[in-house]
Amino acid sequence: MSSSRPSGPLLLRAMLRAERGRIIAAVALLSCWTAGEALVPALIGATIDHAIAGGNLTGLVLWLIALGLCFAMLSFGYRYGARLGNSGMNRQVHQLRTRIAEHVMAPDYRPRSARMPGEIATITSVDTDVSASVIRQASLGFSALGGLLVCAAYLIWANLWVGLSVLIITPLGMAALRWLTPRLSKASDDLQSDIAASGAAAADLMAGIQVLRGIGGHDQAAAHYREASQRAANAGIVSASASGRIDAAQVMVSGTVLLSAAGLGAWQVTASSMSIGALLGVLGVAQFLSTPLGTLVSTVEARTRSVAAAERVATLLADGADRSGMQRPAQRSDGVLTIDLPPFTHGALTVTPGSFTVLVCAEDSVRSQLATMLSLGGEHQERTEAAAITHPRLLLDGIDISHIDPAYLPSLLRLAPHQAHLVEGSIKANIFGEAPLPDPQALQLLLRASGVDELLENFPEGLEHRVQGRGFNLSGGQRQRVALARALAGGPLIRVLQEPTSAVDSVTEANIAQGLLRWRENAQITGAGAGTLLILSTSPTLLHAADEVIFFDRNGSITRSTHVELSAKSTYEKVVSR
């Protein structure tokens, strides 16, 4: 959203404007339903007075036909009016979920506060439904208002005193109901927030259940989830109690209206100011008043829940990085990649453009800093001048990557973390996305360079083999090979990879190393260029295939050479030996 302050009501108004045409059509059709429901007892009373009481057979047939047409009108109106309202609601749910997915998957997405994956999933699945339900409730609410007007018009026509009593008592009852809604709003807000928290706790508990069992922490994690779930249950009880009080008040209001109409109607009949059929019609219409009145109350309740849910959706959509001051350098496959790891590097360390370079660290702390920097190099952070001196930085053509537009960065640099993240779909979709396949020779070299060629031998469908969410139907090594192929696909980008072969066996790793060399050689021959390839790894096979190895020693020194020459150093040999 454009405003710095998220607003649920603004989001609701935007949805209502988007579905304005459907809502108007739904209100018109649903008004036929409520008007028909109100007219049924009135037509029955008229039939008694004008046909049955006088023994008029022809009049009876005509009144029955009118009653049948009334039933047809209300049935048709509800069927198609509800369909329009629900279709508008479901369309907005889909658009909201798509918008959230695009937002959280955007390169520049940065939550303003810590969010667990389960919380985002709960907002996407639950709060979008609750927010968009305002469309259906708006259709029902306006049609219910029309039904109330029809009832009031008939009651005044049937008898002025009865109609006036209904018109006076009903608004007073609705005002009393409105007085109760603020507490319901607060209870609903607490309920939705606690449901989101318990859903987040459950999702994160299941994501790390194996690790928690290994360290004996599953009981503590389960206790944390029980606490979050209990808060949601308590909030649900409070919300249900508030709803129950409103329901009870609704019954009291409708009962008061019915008793007033019955008492005044009986008085008018005894005074010969009203017929028996009119009295029956008045009682039936007065009793029907509970339906549109209840719908109006439900509309108010639904709006309070929708506002609370929309606030959370709007807050999520407001998360994001500030792009002001972000840069967009020229796209170059031979761009200069520089590592600044103070105070270790004693200045910037430049990676040879267009080379295949491997980084090796003797100290785990240095390797951890490099891994963090190479994984989150594009994360925008506000840094003071002093922080920039001590912060690890990754620079492209002299520009700190955190100052490059995150939406533009993937066209310059591909950062592939160690964790292989796969999505549900085919192997081809996980590697190439929606991009077309390269020519057969380039495709074969790419698959060989990543080891996917051997993987496809196990699947008759080849690249069309279906991958489950997170790649659960593939082994760790298989997922890693697909992720490596994805990192290598596309144009001659600058690529930064972390331990891309740690989960494969030594034979497959050797084949991948040779495949990488052939892939880069072919790119040079065709003139496309393979770009700079920087890998953080201790694999001897990859180190032997690399053009250059940069070794960060324990004493703070940096050595740039080949794997063969560096093997003479005992500290280096100790790190890379397996």
Image (cartoon, grey):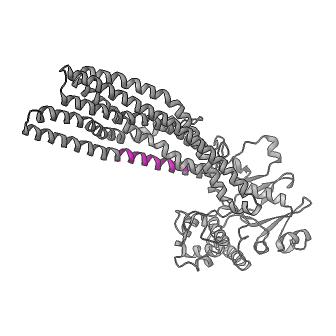
Q: Can the viewer see residue 2 in this picture?
A: no
Count of picture labels:
0
Quadrant in which the N terminus appears: top right
User: Is 480 situated left or right of 373 in this image?
Assistant: left
Q: Nearer the viewer, residue 68 or 258?
A: 258
Residue 107: x and y in percent read 62, 51
The residue drawn where x is 43% and y is 48% is: 90
Tell me, yes or no, whether the highlighted magenta stretch contains residue 94. Answer: yes
Q: Is residue 157 above or below residue 39?
A: above
Residue 412: x and y in percent read 65, 56
Tell me, yes or no, whether the highlighted magenta stretch contains residue 363. Answer: no
Quadrant in which the C terminus appears: bottom right
User: Is 283 situated left or right of 323 in this image?
Assistant: left
Residue 34: x and y in percent read 30, 37
Magenta region, residue range: 83-100
Q: Quadrant of residue 31?
A: top left
What kind of secondary structure does the magenta stretch mostly adopt? Answer: helix
Q: Nearer the viewer, residue 219 or 427?
A: 219
Q: Nearer the viewer, residue 34 or 443?
A: 34
Q: Is residue 9 above or below residue 120?
A: above
Q: Quadrant of residue 548?
A: bottom right
The residue drawn where x is 74% and y is 51% is: 398
User: Is 119 situated left or right of 294 in this image?
Assistant: right
Q: Is residue 419 above or below residue 1?
A: below
Q: Can the viewer see residue 302 in this picture?
A: yes
